[in-house]
Amino acid sequence: MKPGEFAKGALMRLCQVTGDRRHRRRLAELGFVPGAVLSVLNRGMHGGLVLALGDGRVAVDALTAATLVVEPAGE
Amino acid sequence: MNERPLAKALLTKPCCEDDTPGNVSAGDPRVALVGNPNVGKSTLFNVLTGARQRVGNWPGKTVSVAQGTWRSPHGDITLIDLPGTYSLLPGSPDEALTRDLLVDRGMDGRPDLVVITVDAANLARNLYLLAQVMETGVPLVIALTMVDIAKSRGIRIDAGRLAELVDAPVVPLVPRRGEGVDELARVIGEALAAPRRPAVPVLGADLEAALASVTAEVPDDVAGRYPARWLSIALLAGETVPGVPEETTAAARALGAALSTDDELDDPELVIAEQRYAWVHEVIADVVTRNGAGRATWSDRTDQVLTSRWFGPPIFLGVMWAVFVLTTTVAEPLMTGLQGFFDGPVATGAGRLLDAMGAGDAIRGLVMNGLISGVGQVLSFVPLMAIMFVLLSVLEDSGYLARAAFVVDRLMRLIGLPGRAFLPLIVGFGCNVPALAGTRILSDRRHRLLTGLLIPFVTCSARLTVYVLVATAFFGSAAGTVVFAMYVLSIALVIGMGLLLRGTLFRGMAEEPLVLDLPPYRLPAVRVIGAQTWVKLQAFLKTASGIIVATVTLVWLLSSIPFGGHGSFGRTPIEHSVFGAASHAVAPAFAPAGFGDWHASAALITGFVAKEAVVSTMAQTYSMSEPADGHEPNGLGAALRGTIEQTSRGHPIPAVLAFLVFLLAYTPCMTTVAAQRTEIGGRLTLFGIGMQLTLAWLLAVAVFQVGSLFL
């Protein structure tokens, strides 16, 4: 599943990041590693998302959001 | 494969080619500030160094770095404020500096100590960078910032336990309030006196075994040059390190590949990153306790509004409007006042003084029309630049800029620039000079250069006065439409040139997907903004004053020197001066555009110095060549009309449109050139001037030639 398919505030677990190596590395450094728990805080224009990742807040565009493969995570 | 060039020279001079003497003495211990962006690193730097800082280019790079002297109770310390980074595997030139200093320059070039700022309110991502810095083995002190924000969110950090795990001192502080700074000074003093390596993050059994094998294979002479742990990790991740035999590199790479699971998206770099995060979460589990975690923070609630798809864009436009108003309406009277002060009291005073000294006309002209007028022009920009620098700091430090970049990202992508580039371009409509300074908000150098080249095509308010005069004279009640069309054309030029440059000079500029860290909203600290503004203003004055005073003086000199035996120095009509002769000589170049007349070219030449001077030059050239009493209130417009009707051979409308288009597209003013030199360097500035002149001429000729078929 993609983060955009989740309701605001619903918890999801990151399974994988797709895209080129540099992109995956960049996201990994920011904490987007398999197992990380995310939630959507807000939806911007054109599919952009504001994500909560631990204590951090990260804004991503639709393109980046689509590279995040996630699954629902229990409360 | 990554191949990272190693800096050949050791870091004999700590930083900054721009080596102004005075502040930093070579023998002081060197301490580098390292940390994620937006975690209070620069605030700490400003609090510690005050105004004893300067900004210069990193040796061999175009990234500027602030360096300053900290008068600590334990003696002077040279502080280097490295750009914020998330990792030692850099993604941008700014970020590369940290790695350059800690790794690539070799063991001898490293700073004596690293102070790493760690955001207590967002520990995980900050500990990731800490893990990497620990791997380099450099002695370090952890400055635990944002403890106030963490506390307000119910996050408590056991600093003592963290210090044990990392085996390095940890000092909690709130830099903007100066809390913890004395303790930091004491700890740094101790750490410098008895440097020791921090602990090494343990990265899981498989990875540790692989690292041990790689370390055993590295020849001793290479191992001594780099931090051992870092070197092994780099080789395992597939990097090529100069000096390491090919077979060792290949063997390490094979070991790294074996670490990956069967997933094709997995590679050793990611396995290492995952293991570092595993270490990070172990540390967090050990040192963090939370009360009431999970509740929405004030910052999150603000984001619900500011980044929402409905409220985000109008609020963004409102903020941009405020920036625009502050850099135009508010700055304007201050600029006029300062200019008036120089043209009035200062000029009068200097005139009297020169008279008393019995100075000749030449000296008098040089001082009054060259020096005072030039310095006046530079200084009149000071309030505007100060306002701009303060606004930039407030937007950046409050955390809003990151949100603005998110809101407008898609729109700016059209010309291949990130959302943040919107701000300098909008400011450009007021004045191009602060707009160029505003390109500093872009972290990628190529984005800064491209934006810096596009800004002169944004029509500034100085150009507006000329549009209004010319359009009123030729178009009467339709003047408003013509002026509006100039603004539309300006936007079209920015987009068109943006696309053209992206397809040519900036081809291959990576289209970065947007991944933007949103720092919590904060009230900016007045003291820090003051210090930052002062440092930036000094840099502007230093670069701009020379160019502007020289140009203003040159134009005065050329218009004072008689040409062809008419009059004497300073007493020649402008038409018969060298300046007039040059205007005559240039005029034929504009014949294909329908305004090949010396009055027009003279105005355009001084317009190169300042667009404000275009109207006054027109007045000057006409009043000198026509009887003064022949001018009605609108005489200037009428005189220009008469000239253009002659030169355009019966097509005055396309000719005057061509004149306006040329005015829009060519070099805005000398101050812009000076600011461009500061921001994008001399070579690109020259290229930019060439591009502006060529484009302006081509467009003007096209407008006249096509227009005269119809009008």
Image (cartoon, helix red, strand yellow):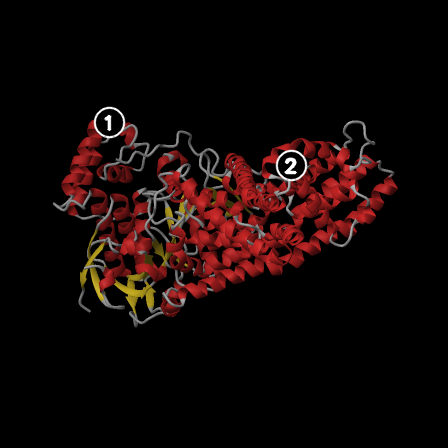
Q: Is residue B69 visible?
A: no
Can you tell which quarter of the image residue B22 is in? Answer: top right
The image shows residue B687, relative to residue A23, as above or below, that is: above
Type of the residue with mark 1: Pro
Give the residue pinned by disc 1.
B245
The quadrant of the image that shows the N terminus of chain B is top left
Q: Are marks 2 and 1 on the same chain?
A: yes
Q: CA distance from mark 2 to mark 1?
A: 68 Å
B27 and B360: which is toward the camera? B360
Nearest the eye: B199 or B261: B261
In the image, B575 versus B55, the foreground residue is B575
State the SS at label 1. loop
Q: Which residue is mark 2?
A: B596
Neighbour tally class for label 2: few under 14, some 14-19, many 20 plus, Cα within 10 Å: many
Snapshot quadrant of residue B705 = top right
Above or below, B176 relative to B342:
below
Q: Position of residue B197 (x, y in %)?
A: 33, 44
Mark 2 secondary-structure assignment: loop
The image shows residue B282 at horizontal and vertical percentages of 23, 57
Mark 2, mark 1: which one is toward the viewer? 2
The local crowd at label 1, few if under 14, some if 14 to 19, many if 20 or more residues have their Cα within 10 Å, is some
